[in-house]
Image (cartoon, grey):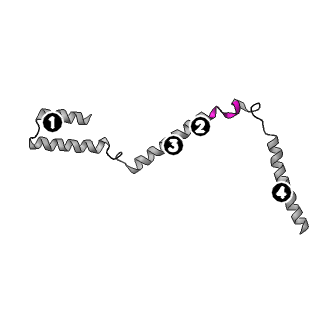
Amino acid sequence: MRSGAFTVTAATLFLFSAGNIAWADAPTFPHDMPWGGGWFMMPIMMLIFLAILALFVVLIVRRLWPSGLPGGSGESTKRAISILEERFARGEIEKEEFEEKKRILEK
């Protein structure tokens, strides 16, 4: 039993010291690191991260509202044109006014 505990202790110490030896051999900043320690990549990676984040937000918004955001121009324009057509059919507005307002709404 004593020999098993000694083996486990020795193996644990070896593993911890092997990691420290490997770390001691690691390159030191700034002399051994190419491109100044990788600092030039930080802005590029940040831009990539922000682009992925923006894409994720756009995909979620499109998934939640397939026809666009509520109050967007798609449905409200169709509704406005239908109201305009109803007013024209009832004779409340003239043909020129109808065509002008419809052209403005379709832009």
**Vertical relation: 49 (above or below) 3:** above
Q: Outermost residue toward the right?
A: 3
Residue shown at the point (82%, 41%) measured from the top left: 24
Nearer-the-camera pick, 83 or 66: 83
Circle 2 residue: 45
Nearer-the-camera pick, 7 or 30: 30
Instruction: Return the disc, 3 or 4, that comes first in the chain's sequence.
Output: 4
Q: CA distance from mark 3 to mark 2?
A: 12 Å
Residue 37 in picture, x, y percent from top left: 70, 33
Q: Is residue 75 magenta?
A: no
Q: Outermost residue toward the left?
A: 91
Circle 3 residue: 53
**Vertical relation: 40 (above or below) 20:** above
**Vertical relation: 18 (above or below) 44:** below
- Three-letter amino acid code at disc 4? Thr
Answer whether labels 1 and 4 touch (C-beta < 8 Å): no
Is disc 2 placed on a helix, strand or loop? helix
Q: CA distance from mark 2 to mark 1?
A: 53 Å
Q: Which residues are magenta?
A: 36-41
Is disc 3 placed on a helix, strand or loop? helix
Q: CA distance from mark 3 to mark 4?
A: 42 Å
Residue shown at the point (15%, 36%) measured from the top left: 98
- Three-letter amino acid code at disc 3? Leu
Q: CA distance from mark 4 to mark 2?
A: 38 Å
Circle 1 residue: 98
Instruction: Return the disc, 3 or 1, that comes first in the chain's sequence.
Output: 3
Instruction: Return the disc, 3 or 2, that comes first in the chain's sequence.
Output: 2
Magenta stretch secondary structure, dominant: helix
Number of residues whose C-alpha sits closer than 10 Å to that of mark 1, classed few (under 14), some (14–19) or many (20 or more): some
Residue shown at the point (13%, 32%) measured from the top left: 96
Residue 59 in picture, x, y percent from top left: 45, 46
Q: Which image quarter holds the C terminus? A: top left
